[in-house]
């Protein structure tokens, strides 16, 4: 165990620097955003009509989005264009709309609206995405947690839960480079999800594939497509895939996507049509034109993103290994893509380490945020978001985080000795 007094002196010295660093949210850096700056001026009065013949200034076009945008969505999500919907900014918005309609009317295979029963339940993976948990809580879902493993959701648990309780209406998780662990679902897990027995006839896989093209390596492992697997298994309506351009172009001004079976898509689009006439066609055309003209297309811009992001992820690994490696104080993930690194402390000191970081001028995702209700039963998980700061600031933040973990661990060790 580290010397507590020495660690406290080091910590106070760092604290006295008055730093203001942030590794709290998975936001693109300015250099990543700048890759898409040409998109701001890529359409003009000459682009009033789309190649498919729609006037972007007027109503016609439909709820499903421009055909060109749906083709883009299909390329990103790995499905057919006629299985996609291209909407406005944020896949979270599309997801919430689907869930609200499910509560009000049910989905295509539902016998009754989800909200008509007792509180419906949703399986979620932990550690997981805090905004998923917040959405489900506000919509009235009870969350049933399963562990996120290196191969995706713990399928033994998922199968047992889904088969035994008809109130369990689905599972919501990130299949590729999961937030925050960076794990990617295995082909075996995809197959098990697609063909497992479920007590609810309308059990739905909500696959939020936010990082499906966000690779950090040249030879990424690409899992089986969940929608295709469900079709092959004879359960075409079981899967709904979501995605967006949020971390491809502008995180605050992009397109959200949905992919589903043709039957589900027809049902969902009819319900969405009660809310609005169609998405922002000008924004969709802007994205289509920009990404089709970008050297290498979607793969090209994602390679450029990886070129900017990989040094940051490498820095996280280098500093954690240097400061914590071999000490038995923490373990962490080594993601091959996505936007996060997940760290687990050996002792239950995550909340204390995060608080120490805050006092030293480093903002980190609150301890517990990767669990429903913000409660991590083991008080050990810390989500690291290295993408937003510049490399020099990230390195400083990581050094302070590592110091705070050592300091908090030493504090805990001393308090345990006193108790004994």
Image: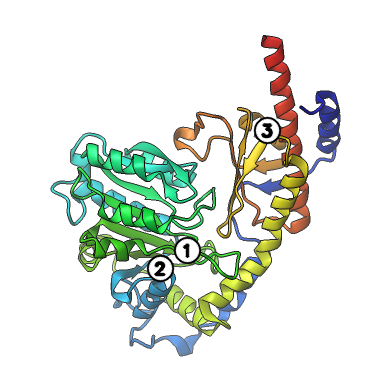
Q: Quadrant where the C terminus lies?
A: top right
Could you tell me which secondary element the residue under label 3 belongs to?
helix
What residue is shown with label 3? 353
Task: From this view, report whether residue 215 is shown above or below residue 322.
Answer: below
* Residue 153 screen position, x and y as percent: 41, 47
Residue 383: image quadrant is top right
* Residue 347 screen position, x and y as percent: 63, 28
* Residue 309 screen position, x and y as percent: 66, 62
Task: From this view, report whether residue 138 is shown above or below residue 193.
Answer: above
Residue lying farthest to the left in this orientation: 111
Q: N-terminal of the two: label 2 or label 1? A: 2
Disc 1 versus disc 3: nearer the observer: 1
Residue lying farthest to the top in this orientation: 420
**Mark 3 and mark 2: Cα distance apart in space:** 38 Å
Could you tell me which secondary element the residue under label 2 belongs to?
helix
What residue is shown with label 1? 212
Q: Which mark is residue 77?
A: 2
Residue 336: image quadrant is bottom right
Q: N-terminal of the two: label 1 or label 3? A: 1
* Residue 219 screen position, x and y as percent: 56, 69
Residue at the spot 37% in from the left edge and 49% down from the top edge: 172
């Amino acid at each position: 165990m580290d010397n507590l007094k020495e660690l406290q002196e080091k910590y106070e010295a760092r604290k006295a620097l008055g730093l203001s660093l942030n590794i709290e949210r998975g936001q693109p850096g300015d250099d990543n955003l700048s890759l898409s700056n040409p998109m701001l001026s890529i359409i003009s009065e000459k682009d009033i009509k789309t190649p498919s013949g729609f006037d972007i200034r007027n109503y016609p076009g439909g709820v499903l989005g421009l055909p060109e945008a749906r083709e883009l969505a299909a390329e990103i999500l790995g499905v057919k264009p006629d299985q996609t919907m291209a909407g406005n900014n944020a896949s979270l918005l599309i997801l919430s709309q689907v869930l609200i309609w499910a509560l009000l009317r049910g989905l295509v295979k539902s016998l009754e609206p989800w909200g008509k029963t007792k509180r419906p339940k949703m399986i979620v993976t932990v550690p997981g995405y805090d905004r998923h948990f917040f959405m489900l809580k506000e919509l009235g879902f009870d969350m049933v947690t399963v562990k996120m493993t290196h191969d995706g959701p713990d399928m033994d648990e998922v199968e047992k839960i889904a088969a035994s309780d008809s109130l369990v209406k689905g599972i919501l998780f990130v299949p590729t480079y999961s937030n925050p662990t960076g794990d990617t679902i295995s082909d075996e897990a995809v197959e098990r999800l697609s063909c497992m027995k479920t007590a609810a006839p309308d059990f739905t896989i909500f696959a939020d594939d936010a990082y499906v093209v966000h690779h950090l390596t040249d030879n990424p492992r690409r899992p089986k497509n969940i929608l295709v697997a469900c079709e092959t298994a004879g359960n075409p309506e079981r899967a709904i895939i979501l995605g967006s351009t949020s971390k491809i172009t502008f995180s605050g001004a992009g397109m959200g996507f949905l992919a589903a079976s043709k039957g589900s898509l027809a049902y969902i689009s009819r319900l969405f049509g009660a809310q609005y006439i169609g998405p922002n066609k000008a924004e969709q055309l802007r994205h289509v034109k920009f990404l089709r003209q970008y050297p290498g297309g979607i793969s090209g811009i994602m390679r450029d993103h990886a070129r900017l992001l990989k040094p940051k992820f490498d820095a996280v690994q280098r500093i954690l290994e240097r400061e914590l490696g071999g000490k038995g104080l923490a373990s962490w993930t080594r993601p091959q893509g996505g936007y996060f690194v997940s760290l687990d402390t050996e002792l239950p000191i995550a909340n204390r380490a995060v608080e120490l970081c805050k006092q030293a001028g480093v903002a980190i995702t609150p301890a517990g945020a990767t669990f429903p209700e913000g409660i991590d039963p083991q008080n050990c998980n810390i989500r690291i978001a290295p993408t937003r700061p510049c490399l020099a600031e990230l390195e400083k933040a990581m050094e302070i985080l590592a110091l705070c973990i050592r300091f908090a661990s030493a504090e805990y060790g001393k308090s345990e000795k006193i108790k004994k």
